[in-house]
Amino acid sequence: MKGKFITIEGCEGVGKSTQLRLLKEYCENNGIDALFTREPGGCEVSEKIRNVILDPENGDMTDMTELLLYCAARAQHTERVIKPALESGRTVFCDRYCDSTAAYQGYARGIDIDVVNALNRAAMCGVSIDWTILMDVPPDKGFARKGGAQESDRLERETLAFHKKVYEGFTEIAKADRARFLCFRAEGTKYETHEAIVQALKEKGVFQ
Ligand code: TMP
């Protein structure tokens, strides 16, 4: 692939969206042709699947159905949006990708990680991730930042214990693949974290 593929991962409310917004502004201000997209979603079919997955009324959804829906959304998004962008040389930033599936459906829901990895591989349609930015913030802090859960979706409504398992999952996944992960504890201001991310992406040759 000619373009670089960067994913951003982490628990709920850890500042991913803010960092993606700042990265988008950085790319616009520096003439970098980058695509910003998200999972689940990122194209028409996958956004429809997102609505099904996250709908709080779908409380009866089984863990395997949930896993397959995330992977179905990913296959469509990858083939229709991510792959063409990478082939044309664009840098792609994706808000969540396969590591979320491993952390949420594998580590937290408890689905066999080999099954999750096999489905992830199929859903990636031959694309590989160059770098993953992990917002390494424990869920209790993220929950506090996010505030009221009144409007929350089906996954956000899970218990703190569930989100702690997600965090442990991300920690394990990052430990097992140190070469791909760029971890940020986000202890300073959002601008300090942004600077650190930009610096890391410069060191990796994503930005000049
Ligand atoms: P978002 O809130 O970051 O847009 O993500 C939607 C929710 O979906 C969030 O709770 C994380 C969850 N998720 C998974 O459980 N598995 C996945 O594969 C992805 C991409 C997201």
Image (spheres, grey):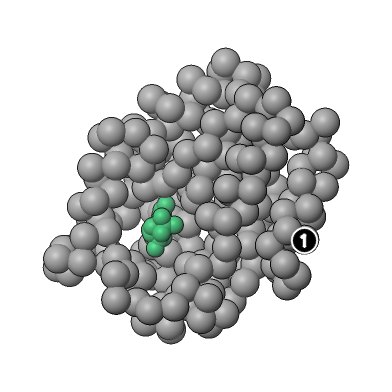
Ligand 1 within 8 Å of disc 1? The answer is no
The quadrant of the image that shows the C terminus is: top right
| Residue 192 seen in the current view | yes
Whether residue 119 is situated above or below residue 176 in the rendered picture: above
- Residue drawn at x 74%, y 30% as measured from the top left: 30
State how many labels appear. Answer: 1
- Residue farthest to the front? 29
Q: Quadrant of ligand 1?
A: bottom left
Instruction: Find residue 87 and report its horizontal and vertical position in percent.
Output: 56, 18
- Residue drawn at x 58%, y 48% as measured from the top left: 20
Identified by mark 1, the residue type is: Glu
Left or right? Give the position of 53 relative to 186.
left
Residue bearing mark 1:
192
| Residue 172 seen in the current view | no
Whether residue 43 is situated above or below residue 11 in the rendered picture: above
- Residue drawn at x 20%, y 52% as measured from the top left: 52
- Residue drawn at x 50%, y 68% as measured from the top left: 13
Instruction: Find residue 139 and report its horizontal and vertical position in percent.
Output: 53, 77
Left or right? Give the position of 109 relative to 2.
left
Instruction: Find residue 28 and report its horizontal and vertical position in percent.
Output: 65, 32
The quadrant of the image that shows the N terminus is: top right
Q: Secondary structure at mark 1?
A: helix
Left or right? Give the position of 64 relative to 126.
left
Disc 1 crowd, CA 10 A, few/some/many (<14, 14-19, 20+): few
Left or right? Give the position of 180 relative to 200.
left
Instruction: Find residue 29 and report its horizontal and vertical position in percent.
Output: 70, 33
- Residue farthest to the top? 88
Q: Quadrant of residue 130?
A: top right
Q: Quadrant of residue 135?
A: bottom right
